[in-house]
Amino acid sequence: MTSEIHTPFISVIVPTYNRAHIIATTIENILAQSYKNFELIVVNDGSSDDTNKAIQPYLDKIIYIEQENKGITGARNTGIRASKGEWIALQDSDDYWDTHKLEQQVQDIADHPGLNVYFLETYLERNHLEGEVRSYEHSGFDQYLNKNQFTTFERPLSYHVKYGVAWVQTTLIRREVLFDIGLYDEWLTLFTDLDLFCRLGLKGQWGFHDKPLVKVQRVAEDKSYISSQRTNTPAKPYRNLAYILEKIRFSSELTPDEATAITKRLYNSYSGLGNELYKEGDKQGARDCFRRAMQLEKNPRITIKFLLTFLMLRHNVSEYRPVIPKGNWY
C-alpha cells in the first residue's frame, strides 16, 4: 500500500454468544489482516459457556465488552457505540475473512471517496457435503455485476428490496452514516441486516467488488435456529418484512423505481401474512392483511381471500396482529 493512499482507522465489531470453541480462531483470523490500522471490538452477549476464558489470551490486542444477553442486534449496537473508527466492519464469530479483505476495501474506497457502504462477493459454505458456492451466481442480482471488477451503485435500495443483496460480514460502512440511520433495530429477530441495508440504501453510493474475500458458514446449528423461527411461527417472517418496508415506504427520498419495488414486496408480505393468520384461525387479522394488500395492488385472488374471512369468523388472536409503525400508512 502506497503512502499516498488514505489509511482510515477501521473498527471491526464481532458479537459472540456461546462460541467458546471457535471465537479464538475468529480473533486470530481478523488480527492476521494485512491492513493493520484497525481496532477489534468483541462483544460477549451473555455467553454461558467458556467464551470469557477463550478470549483471555487476547485482552491486550482487542477491546472486550461483556453484557447481558440482548441478541445479535443489541450486541452489534454495543460494539458500534464503543467504536472509534471512521469505518465500521462487521463480522460474525464463526465466519472467515481472507487476509487481504480490509486492504482491498481500503484501496477501493480511496479510489471512490463518495462511497458510504462497500460490500464484497462471498463464498457460502452451506454444509460440509455441499461445499462452497458463490453467493451471487444464481441470485438474480448477478446480472447487474461486472465479474471480478468493482461496481458502484448510486441508488442501491431497490436491489436490496428485490434481492437482499449484501452479506453484513463483507461490508465496510461509514460510522457517521450508521448513526444517522439509527443503528440496528433491536426489535427485529429476522431480516435484521436487510432492515439495516434498506435504510442505508437511502444514504448514498455503495460499492461492490466481485472478489470473494469472505466465507460465510451456515452450519447445522444456525440452520436449525433460523428454521425454528420460521416453522414455529410461520407468520413471523412476513410480519418482520412488512415492518421493515413500512418504515421506509413513505420516505421523501424514494425514487419511483424504489417505491415500486417496495410496494411489490410489501404486497407479497401482507398476502403471505394474511395466509398464515388465516391458517391459525385469526380471520380478523388475516382480513386486515388482505385489505392492506388490496390497497397496494389489485388482484382478484386477494379480493376473494378477503371476502372469505367474513365467513365463519372464529376468534380474534390479538398477539398475531402485524406490528406496524405508527403513522398514516394508508
Image: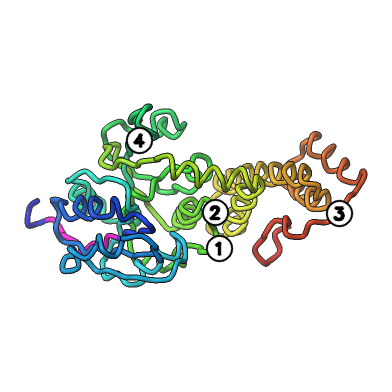
Residue at 47 percent of width and 41 percent of height: 223
Residue displayed at 34% across by 42% down: 216
Task: Please state the extent of the stretch shown in magenta in the rendering.
Answer: 5-12
| Comes first in the chain, label 4 or label 2 | 4
Indicate yes or no whether the magenta region holds residue 6. yes
Q: Is residue 59 left or right of residue 157?
A: left
Indicate whether 82 appears above or below 147.
below
Disc 3 crowd, CA 10 A, few/some/many (<14, 14-19, 20+):
few
Which numbered disc, 2 or 1, marks the residue closer to the eye? 1
- Which numbered tag is attached to residue 1? none
Quadrant in the picture for the C terminus = bottom right
In the image, what residue occupies the spot 32% across and 59% down?
Answer: 14
Q: Nearer the viewer, residue 199 or 171?
A: 171
Q: Which residue is mark 2?
A: 254
Q: Secondary structure at mark 1?
A: loop
Residue 125 badge: 4
Mark 4: amino acid: Glu
- Between 11 and 228, the one lying in front of the other is 228
Looking at marks 3 and 4 on the same chain, the residue that comes earlier in the sequence is marked by: 4
Point out the tag, 2 or 1, that comes first from the N-terminus: 1
- Residue 187 sits in which quadrant? bottom right
Residue 322 is situated, as x and y percent measured from the top left of the image, at 70, 56
- Residue receiving disc 1: 187
Look at the numbered disc 3 and give the secondary structure of its residue.
Answer: loop
Which badge, 4 or 1, is on the more N-terminal residue?
4
Quarter of the image where one finds residue 23: bottom left
* Mark 3 or mark 2: whose residue is earlier in sequence: 2
Note whether 215 is above or below 115 in the view shown: above
Q: CA distance from mark 2 to mark 1?
A: 24 Å
Main secondary structure found in the magenta portion: loop
Task: Specify whether 47 is left or right of 30.
Answer: right
Q: CA distance from mark 4 to mark 2?
A: 35 Å
